[in-house]
Structure formats: structure tokens, C-alpha cells
Amino acid sequence: MAYIQMKDVSFVYPGGFLAVDNINIEIEKGENVAIIGQNGAGKTTTVKMMNRLEKPTKGDVMIGDMNTKSYTTAQVSRVVGYVFQNPDDQIFHSTVISEVEFGPRMMKLPSEIISERVSCALKLTGLEQFRDTNPYDLPLSIRKFVTIAAIIAMDTEVVIFDEPTAGQDLRGNHYLSDILRTLNQRGKTVITISHDMEFVAANFDRVIVMANKKVVTSGTPKEIFWSFDALEKAKLKQPYISRLCRELGIEGNIIEMDEAVEAIKEKCLLN
């Protein structure tokens, strides 16, 4: 049985707006999954139901043997951590360290464990030099890492990122890649919403495509980014590397730069 299961799940906001329409999703423990789709596809509402920020109108969301309908948001958040797209929706302490400590303190953990978790989270996110800084004195791109560190310090089994690359430069994206890889190596289940197709192609084992409030399909990045039917339904483009290789007539369902360089070299030698 999959660790996360969404069974015939729909969500209707007050006022009658249907945001998610009868979806079924299964995610195994320890998977590293991206969810992609245009704005309005239902992505954020879907992941918010995974940690009980939203309660399904219809259907069931299971995390292990826990049906989220039977638990509070606070209880589910100990298992499923959620990093908001906008860090200002999440930060409310006056220093970075107090923000990162908050979750573990609320869990009433021993002080030595809190200290260890906070130290590891600050190191992983590159925030050690900012521990005593007010988060709102930091630029948005770094402020986003404060919220990531706060969730990492809680050591949840599942970590959800909502558009983590938004507002990031190349350096920030490299940090994010390292964080995702480290969490996955620790056995965490990582779920990420992203509009950055290059980032998705390079960092995830499986991609779930959503469009019109439904799940269109799922597969490996190579499968998804060379499935023109799925991309058309979701109104998404291939990563630019894939588009370049396609224009050059290079075969192999290429999605990453290193693959493209080798394929182009080989093509040039053959010609």
C-alpha cells in the first residue's frame, strides 16, 4: 500500500468553486515527486489536503494508516511539513533561529535534540551566518530558506515544497537541489510543486501532471517531457534542452544539459 493515498478526492471552496475534481494519487514512502501544471490546475489545493490545511469535500486522504479527516492540522503537520510559496505567510518570529526552533519546541522535544535539529537545518540551508538576523531583514530569496529550515528542523516524514524556485537565482536553485537530494537520502518523502521545468527535469524521480483540476498522468521526467499529448493537455512546454534537441533532430528523450552535450558532440562527429 502506498504511503500517501488520495482516493476519489474532490475539494470545493466556500461559494461553490471546484478546485480539485475526483483525483486519485499514490505516493510511496521515500519518493521524490514533482507536481506540475498551469495555475488553476489544482496543485496547491491538492498538496494542502495532504497536510490537512484543507479538508477534502469528498474522498479520503491517507498518510500511512492516518485518515486526515480524523486528525487536526496540528497533528498532521507533525508528519507532513509544508513550505509555503510565500515565506511571509509562514514567518512570524524576530530572528532566524527562533523561527527555526519554533516547531521542535512546540513538539516539546528535549533541548539537546532541538539544538541538534536546528543546527543541522541551518547548515543544510546555508543560514548559519544569519541565525540572529531578523528574517525580514533578509531578501525574499533567502527568506524562503528560513521557512525551509523551519520545516526541516521538525524532521517530518513528508516535506512539501510549494514553488521553491520562485524568485531564486542559479545559486539558490543549486541549494534547493542539494536540500532535496539530502532529504531524499534521509528517507523523506518529498513532494514539490514547480513551474520550473528545467528544475523538475533535473531533480525528481516521478512527475505528476495536473490540468483542469484533475490528474492527467504521471511518469518519469523522461516519459512526461516527451509525452506531447500530456504536455498539450496541461499547456506545458518541454525543458528548453529537450526543445533544442528536438529541433536538432537528436533522439533519446533528452531532458538534461549533460545528456544534450554528449548527444550534440556525437552528432557533430557523425557529420
Image (cartoon, rainbow, N blue to C red):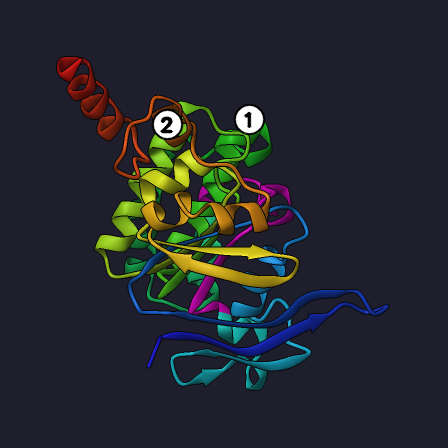
Q: Residue at x 55, y 26 (%)?
A: 139
Check the image and report above or below for 145 versus 211: above
Provide the residue span drawn in magenta.
Answer: 77-97
Q: Residue at x 25, y 61 (%)?
A: 187
State the SS at label 1: loop
Determine which residue is flagged by label 2.
241
- Which quarter of the rendering shows the C terminus? top left
Determine the CA span between mark 2 and mark 1: 30 Å
Residue 40: horizontal and vertical position, in percent? 68, 52
Q: Which label lies toward us, 2 or 1?
A: 2
Q: Residue flagged by tag 2: what amino acid is it?
A: Ile
Residue 166: horizontal and vertical position, in percent? 54, 35
Crowd class of label 1 (few under 14; some 14 to 19; many from 20; radius 10 Å): few
109 inside magenta stretch: no
Q: Which mark is residue 139?
A: 1
Q: Residue at x 53, y 43 (%)?
A: 163
Residue 263 lies in what quarter of the image?
top left
Check the image and report above or below for 81 versus 67: above
Q: Is residue 131 visible?
A: no
111 or 231, which lies in front?
Answer: 231
